[in-house]
Image (spheres, helix red, strand yellow):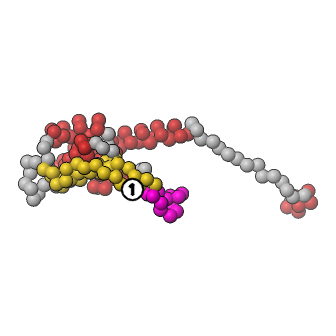
């Protein structure tokens, strides 16, 4: 579920793939307050929120042949923010799991704002860092829960050789 771009390098700002991965998993409780007045704007829709199904593929052992695992519900949208020249306005895009049109809209608004250099540092601190911390806590919680059911197997190798074979090893 978590990818290499989930870890945020300290010495450089997040690139678009990193922040879009974070926004796709950001809970509504973190999105809405961090966007402030932009959360309630009426965007110029390029593609209004729509819900559909996406086929999820898996790999045996993470490296084997791909197989269709099943379908998941995804909501997507694309927009431009109002109060900007149309040609200069960034396009915000979002894909989120589930049916929440509002979450997809907020993620797309955040994507559009993060493309503006003057907004990026502010939103990185007020939105992306809390999302990273939230996802890290969730990952640790899942790991701790899985550890409670962990079973460690061990085997005892039986000695099948004769005493004469053991003397030959010395």
Left or right: residue 77 compared with residue 129: left
The total number of labels drawn is 1
In the drawing, does residue 82 fall left or right of residue 106? left
Using the rendered image of the protein, determine whether residue 67 is visible from the camera's viewpoint: yes
Mark 1 burial class by Cα count in 10 Å: few <14, some 14-19, many 20+: few
Residue at image coords 12%, 50%: 44
Q: Helix, strand or loop at disc 1? A: strand
Q: Give the range drawn in magenta.
A: 57-68
Q: Which residue occupies 52% across, 62% down?
A: 64
Percent x, y of residue 56? 41, 55
Q: Where is residue 153 in the image (x, y as percent from the top left)?
A: 67, 45
Name, please, the residue furthest toward the right. 164
| Left or right placement of residue 84 versus residue 65 in this view | left
Q: Which residue matches tag 1?
A: 55
Residue at the image point whose x is 9% and y is 51% from the top: 84
Write the residue at 37% across / 40% down: 133
């Amino acid at each position: 579920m978590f990818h290499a771009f989930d870890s945020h390098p300290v010495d450089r700002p997040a690139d678009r793939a990193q922040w879009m991965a974070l926004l796709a998993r950001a809970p509504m409780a973190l999105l809405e307050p961090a966007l402030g007045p932009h959360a309630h704007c009426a965007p110029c829709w390029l593609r209004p929120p729509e819900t559909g199904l996406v086929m999820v593929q898996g790999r045996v052992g993470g490296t084997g042949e791909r197989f269709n695992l099943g379908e998941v519900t995804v909501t997507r949208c694309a927009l431009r923010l109002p109060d900007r020249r149309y040609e200069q306005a960034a396009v915000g895009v979002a894909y989120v799991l589930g049916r929440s049109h509002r979450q997809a809209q907020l993620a797309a608004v955040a994507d559009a704002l993060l493309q503006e250099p003057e907004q990026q540092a502010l939103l990185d601190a007020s939105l992306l860092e809390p999302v990273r911390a939230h996802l890290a806590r969730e990952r640790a919680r899942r790991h701790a829960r899985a550890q409670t059911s962990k079973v460690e197997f061990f085997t005892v190798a039986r000695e099948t050789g004769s005493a004469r074979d053991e003397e030959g090893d010395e």
